[in-house]
Image (cartoon, grey):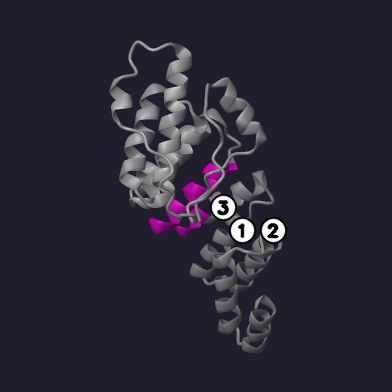
Amino acid sequence: MLSLQTDQRQIQQQQLLMQSARVSYNNGDHQRDNSYGLSTEIVSSSYGLSTESLEATEEMLMSVAHQSYKSGDFRQALDHSKAVYERNPMILDNLLLLGAIYYQLHEFDLCIAKNEEALRIDRKFAECYGNMANAWKEKGNIDVAIRYYLVAIELRPNFADAWSNLGSAYMRKGRLTEAAQCCRQALSLNPHLVDAHSNLGNLMKAQGLVQEVYCSELLED
């Protein structure tokens, strides 16, 4: 699962860089929401506007980009997010969003590159390390992915998605005990993580703990 959120420290820094409100959803949330509508004509009509007007334009473009991302229209999200980037390449939320969009489009190298740009602004941006790890995992380099997940968790120990994704990476390396520990840690932080529940169930079945899986499923129901 990709991360698209920042903490209070990032919010304060974003305000200094004229950024829009932080994003509070992740890539697992693709529920359609058609409440936003913004013509792309706003991109070409922004020249000559005041600083406040340009900032408002960035915020509107970001809103449309977020909604397009959530609805699964990644190409449209990319168009609006790139328009924001052209105005201000220092917006952390937008760099994180760009990375997430490229991930969904399977442009993993570009995903990594945008997260690296964000890290040049804030080296302690845990979500960037987690998202780069996801990209490296998709590229087949599990060892690098694990290293980045561990960095993300070191920076943010309560990062449930990173714990869950680390568990998945350990599974692909055959390190089942460590994978199970990561899944349990993820679920202790967020009991509703579907991937962590699924991975833990598969791990327990692989280890012959079928009865324990059955009891766990009964408790969830």
For disc 2, the marked residue is 189
* Residue 80 locus on image (x, y percent): 36, 34
Q: Using residue 210 as the reference point, say whether residue 101 is left or right of it.
A: left
- Quadrant for the C terminus in the image: bottom right
In this picture, is 98 found above or below 169? above
Q: Which residue is mark 1?
A: 163
* Residue type at numbered disc 2: Leu
Along the viewing direction, whichever of 100 and 123 lies nearer the viewer: 100
Q: Which residue is denoted by mark 3 in the rendering?
A: 149
As rendered, which of 166 and 221 lies closer to the eye? 221
Amino acid beneath label 1:
Trp
Residue 58 position within the rendered picture, expressed as x and y whole percent measured from the top left: 43, 26
The image quadrant of residue 214 is: bottom right
Mark whose residue sits in front, 1 or 2: 2
Mark 1 and mark 2 lie on one chain; the one further toward the N terminus is 1
What is the span of residues highlighted in magenta in the rendered image? Answer: 126-145
Residue farthest toward the front in the current orientation of the protein: 35
* Callouts 1 and 2 close, C-beta under 8 Å: yes
Identify the residue shown where x is 64% and y is 50%: 153
- Quick one: label 1, few (<14), some, or many (20+) residues within 10 Å? many
The picture quadrant where one finds residue 186 is: bottom right
Residue 116 in view here: no
Q: Nearer the viewer, residue 139 or 126?
A: 126
Q: Residue at x 28, y 22 (%)?
A: 44
Left or right? Give the position of 122 relative to 89: right
Mainly helix, strand or loop, the magenta region?
A: helix
Q: Could you say whether the residue bearing mark 1 is in a helix, strand or loop?
A: helix
Spatial CA span between label 2 and label 3? 16 Å
